[in-house]
Image: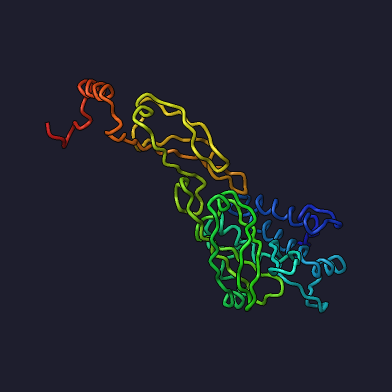
């Protein structure tokens, strides 16, 4: 079957700018990735998208395609480099950032799904990627520390790294829902071998991912409660990724109770959203703050309460 026009595959016009091509690719990649797209030909669709993007995201290869169509670049003496969408610039001198490309879109999905399926972004088994085997052997790993909120929400992050003996500042695009230990592989322009960025996510003062597995979108926050709040109920403010939210504490809430705030977790690039779980912890007041009147009231209450230590295994 004849190949489709690469511009049609990406859904852009032949006059599309590089930025329009990147945006179209990102949008369709989220829709067509085999982990999300359940159509029988999902892998074929995604592979077609990747081939189109690799051809049109590089100026040299795009010029060749516009002139010769699907003819093999090697038969015309024209080569190309891998595609990209990350910016880097040397520190100092006031130079503006120049683009370099992601070596493989699978690195982005490694960040979302932890690459637990053992396949490339094109759906091919890792063993089928022999054309990248030699290049993988020359990769350099660099550990990058990323703030918790940035890893959860996604965004641009500048890091200072040594590349081939020269200190450079690289601006890296961190995907939303990036997990601790995720790997992003990038190849800066003018550098002979790719660089693997190993993401280490800094701890947040109170928020945490409910599960360290790369796929979770749920968050947890421990919520201390006073005795009166737990006993009588209250409405309190709890921290979220975007600020704070109101949480209703039902009367009689004890320690370890999980209260869910729907949709307040991490939002992934494909639109899925997790929840925020508030885990209560009862805080006993310092006895020095108990006035005689309060003590008398507590003693009266204790006489009316039933002991919680009853049932099988407890002494009579």
Residue 225, given in percent of the width and then of the height, sits at 38, 34
Closer to us: 30 or 89: 89
Q: Is residue 273 visible?
A: yes
Quadrant into which the C terminus falls: top left
Q: Nearer the viewer, residue 4 or 310?
A: 310
- Residue at x 74% of width, y 53% of height: 23
Asked if residue 38 can be seen in this view, the reply is: no
Q: Quadrant of residue 75?
A: bottom right
Q: Position of residue 202 (x, y in %)?
A: 50, 56
Q: Residue at x 53, y 63 (%)?
A: 118
Residue 32 location, x and y as percent?
Answer: 66, 52
Residue drawn at x 59%, y 57% is: 109
Identify the colour scheme used: rainbow
| 281 horizontally vs 68: left or right | left
- In the visual, does 298 lie left or right of 80? left
> Picture coordinates of residue 68 (x, y %)?
86, 69
The image shows residue 231, relative to residue 199, as above or below, that is: above
Please determine whether, in this image, residue 72 is positioned above or below residue 210.
below
Apparent side of residue 265 relative to residue 47 in the rendered image (left or right)? left
> For the view shown, which residue lies furthest in the left direction?
316
Q: Residue drawn at (47%, 31%), measured in percent from left and top? A: 236
The image quadrant that residue 224 belongs to is top left
Q: Quadrant of the N terminus?
A: bottom right
């Amino acid at each position: 079957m004849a190949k489709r026009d690469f511009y049609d595959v990406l859904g852009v016009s032949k006059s599309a700018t590089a930025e329009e091509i990147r945006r179209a690719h990102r949008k369709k990649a989220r829709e067509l990735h085999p982990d999300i797209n359940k159509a029988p030909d999902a892998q074929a669709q995604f592979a077609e998208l990747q081939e189109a993007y690799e051809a049109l995201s590089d100026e040299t290869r795009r010029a060749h395609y516009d002139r010769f169509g699907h003819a093999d670049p090697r038969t015309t003496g024209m080569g190309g480099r891998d595609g990209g969408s990350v910016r880097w610039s040397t520190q100092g001198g006031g130079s503006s950032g120049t683009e370099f490309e992601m070596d493989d879109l699978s690195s982005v999905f490694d960040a979302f799904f932890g690459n637990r399926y053992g396949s490339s972004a094109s759906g091919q088994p890792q063993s089928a990627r022999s054309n990248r085997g030699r290049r993988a052997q020359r990769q350099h790993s660099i550990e990058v520390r990323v703030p918790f909120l940035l890893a959860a929400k996604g965004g641009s992050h500048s890091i200072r790294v040594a590349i081939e003996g020269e200190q450079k500042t690289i601006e890296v695009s961190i995907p939303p829902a990036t997990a601790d230990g995720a790997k992003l592989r990038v190849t800066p322009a003018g550098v002979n071998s790719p660089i693997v960025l190993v993401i280490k996510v800094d701890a947040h003062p109170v928020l945490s991912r409910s599960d360290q597995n790369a796929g979770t979108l749920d968050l947890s926050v421990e919520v201390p409660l006073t005795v009166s709040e737990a006993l009588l109920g209250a409405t309190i403010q709890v921290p979220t990724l975007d600020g704070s939210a109101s949480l209703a504490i039902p009367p009689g809430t004890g320690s370890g109770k999980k209260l869910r705030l729907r949709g307040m977790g991490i939002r992934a690039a494909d639109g899925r959203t997790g929840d925020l779980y508030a885990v209560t912890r009862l805080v006993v007041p310092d006895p020095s703050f108990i006035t005689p009147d309060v003590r008398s009231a507590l003693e009266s209450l204790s006489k009316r309460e039933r002991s919680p230590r009853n049932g099988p295994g407890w002494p009579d």
